[in-house]
Amino acid sequence: MKFWRGKDGIWRVRDTIPCLPAQCDACKAGKSHKKHSRRFQKSLGKVKGEAEALALEVVQKEKDRGRGVEPIPTLGKAVLRWLASHKVGTNRDNSEVSWGHWRNIEEFGRCYLYGMEDMPMDRITNEVVQLARGRHLNGRTGASADLWLRNLNLVGNWAVGAKLVPARPWKVKFIDPPKARRPTLPMSMVAAYVNAALEVSYVTKRWKAEGAEVRYARNEQVKTALYLMFGLLLREGEVLGFRWEWLDLENETYWPGFAKGKDLKPVPMPQWLVAFLKVLKGDQPRLGLIIPNDDGGRHGPGFTRKAMAAANRKLGVKGISPHRIRGTLMTQLFRQGAPPKEVQTIGRHEELETTMIYYEEDLEIARRHMNELGDTMGLA
């Protein structure tokens, strides 16, 4: 390796890199070239110390490239490769990740890399990550910064697993701020909530031209979606991909076909939902999506968003979403005395620890049980 400063004051590096005959175009074409090697030269800058460090890095990368070793990608390119390898297609039931998760990482890579997008992943240190997180914290909460760091760690860990980098060079602790109480929907308001959601008019120019019958059919689909959420504790994406062939209405169970790579087990269904689905199905055997769009395919994300937002406004509740319905019902099952393992089965969680995350603590309930304990001990 030759390292020198030119007359213009710029430091340069030059070296000869041996080629691999199996990867060399000249060798493949049967052409002879001197010692089966190639020569390269690169300008590095005017500061000697920085140029020396960069020279060693450049030479190593050229040697790796000559051996067929893939160079370390930048963080921006790693995010793009993650998105490409986890692309959510039209058949989202067979996708490795949910549409919402994919979109979250896409937005992270597009908007929130804070200058790290062009930085090789092996040069992203703890200091670099902390500076970027500090920029993200400007005007945002600690929970948002923790979500940002989780996304960064996810891409880094995936890159290690894909052998794009030997190891993740940063290890930054989460802020882990105190968690605010998550909203829940009182059970006495569920029926009113569903009715309020169905009052929303989904009118477009096409539906106006076709009349009220189409609007009624759309509201019936929203009603079916909400019933599946409240009856089976499904996420919105699972509701939109739910299929008739997964149901066993005679035995009041269903098989969660959206369980990705997990052991499929039948999940019980409440009788009121079974009765509703039997009426919806009719006497004829049915296959395909329970809630198809006009073309027979799957509705896009946010199908129930407008209806639920209207119900939240009318009933004066905040933050009720499909996932909060799921958390509300799991909490209610615990309070009704359902054993944790049964709640885990209903929630379709692989680990019981995940199920317990959904439980919302209530100080009044805890106080009542402590008072009952005092009565039992005879100390009250």
Image: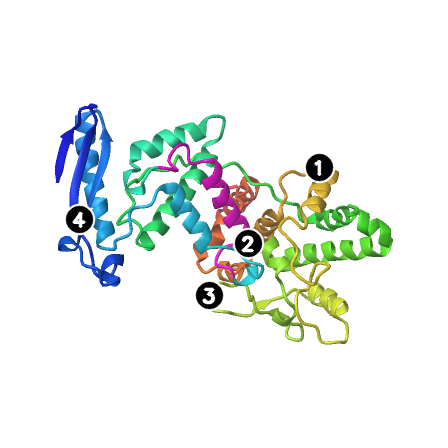
Q: Which is nearer the N-term, disc 2 or disc 1?
A: 1
Q: What residue type is labelled 1?
A: Gly
Residue on which the image places disc 1: 316
Mark 2 Cα shell of 10 Å, populated few (<14), some (14-19), many (≥20) = some
Comes first in the chain, label 3 or label 2: 3
The secondary structure type at the circle numbered 3 is: loop
Residue 247 placement (x, y as % from top left): 63, 70
Residue numbers of the magenta segment: 95-118
Q: Which residue is drawn at 61% across and 44% down?
A: 184
Residue 222's place in the image compared with 73, above or below, is: below
Are the two marked residues, 4 and 1, in contact with CB atoms closer than 8 angstroms? no
Residue visible at 82% across and 56% down? 214
Residue receiving disc 2: 334
Label 2 sits on what residue type?
A: Phe
Q: Residue 209: in sight, yes or no?
A: yes
The relative height of residue 217 versus residue 318 in the rendered view (above or below) is: below
Q: How far apart are marks 4 and 2 (CA)?
A: 66 Å
Q: Are marks 3 and 1 in contact (CB under 8 Å)?
A: no
Q: Which of marks 3 and 4 is nearer the N terminus?
A: 4
The amino acid type of the residue labelled 4 equals Ile
Q: Is residue 359 visible?
A: no
Real-space CA distance between mark 4 and mark 1, rounded to the nearest whole angstrom: 70 Å
Q: How crowded is mark 3: few (under 14 residues within 10 Å), some or many (20 or more)?
A: few
Q: Is mark 1 on a helix, strand or loop?
A: loop
